[in-house]
Image (spheres, grey):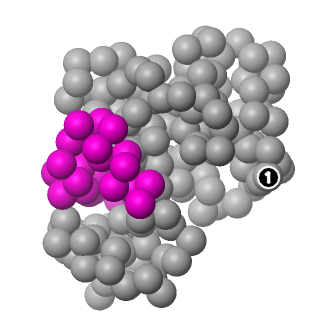
Amino acid sequence: MDRERAWNLLCEHTKSESLRKHGLAVEAAMRHFARRFGEDEHDWAVVGILHDFDYEKFPTEHPQAGKPILDAAGLEPKLVRAIQSHGDHTGVPRESRMEKTLYAVDELTGFVVAVALVRPGKDLSSVESSSVRKKMKDKAFARAVDRAAMLRGADDLGVPFDDLVGEVVTALRGVAAQLGLAA
């Protein structure tokens, strides 16, 4: 599946601008890590775009409810599996580096975006690992984000958490304008 088709599938099933932007953010992080790990950037990007495509329609059955849609769209089985493994509730163990990376960056990209949104200027240029760590301690900030899952994702990937944050911030800066987070 090419990127345009993946984006169109996301847009067909997701009307929320914030969920679409989340898809772009996770795509950017997945591309970044695919390059870092010497993996297939295209496949990793498609997984990033599509990982939450069914969330708006099926919030409690996500991502399992979307599997038949992805299968019918012809998405490669290993990419469908990666999407299926990105939540702790799915019962699909994360085995590949792609699966572990998706899990590691999913919640973290949302958290980094939330940190940027409360900064002066609402941009990513001033977000650092230390500012993300500080906001993690504030339990009232982005309270729906599972901080333990973010830390577990870094551990499972074998990347120190602060390094993971730094790399995610770098990846998101590349798409800051699309996310509405550019100065």
Residue 176 in view here: yes
Count numbered badges in the picture: 1
Magenta stretch secondary structure, dominant: helix
Q: Position of residue 72 (x, y in %)?
A: 80, 16
> Residue 168 lies in magenta, yes or no?
yes
Q: Give the residue type that dot 1 points to.
A: Thr
Compared across the picture, whether 49 is left or right of 151 comes to right
Residues 142 and 128: in front is 142
Residue 7 in view here: no
Q: Position of residue 178 (x, y in %)?
A: 44, 56
Q: Image point 61% across, 29% down: which residue?
A: 92
Vertically, is 27 above or below 162?
above
> Residue 139 lies in magenta, yes or no?
no
Compared across the picture, whether 107 is left or right of 35 comes to right
Q: Report which residue position mark 1 lands on.
A: 60
Vertically, is 147 above or below 165?
below
Q: Position of residue 94 (x, y in %)?
A: 48, 29
Quarter occupied by residue 141: bottom left
Vertically, is 182 above or below 83?
below
Residues 171 and 99: in front is 99
Q: Image point 58% across, 43% down: which residue?
A: 87
Residue segment shown in magenta: 148-177
Q: Image point 23% across, 37% down: which residue?
A: 158
Compared across the picture, whether 84 is left or right of 175 comes to right
Vertically, is 152 above or below 148?
above
Give SS at disc 1.
Answer: loop
Q: Image point 44% across, 38% down: which residue?
A: 102
Q: Where does the N terminus fall, quadrant-wise?
A: top right
Residues 78 and 148: in front is 148
Q: Residues within 10 Å of mark 1 (few under 14, many from 20)?
A: few
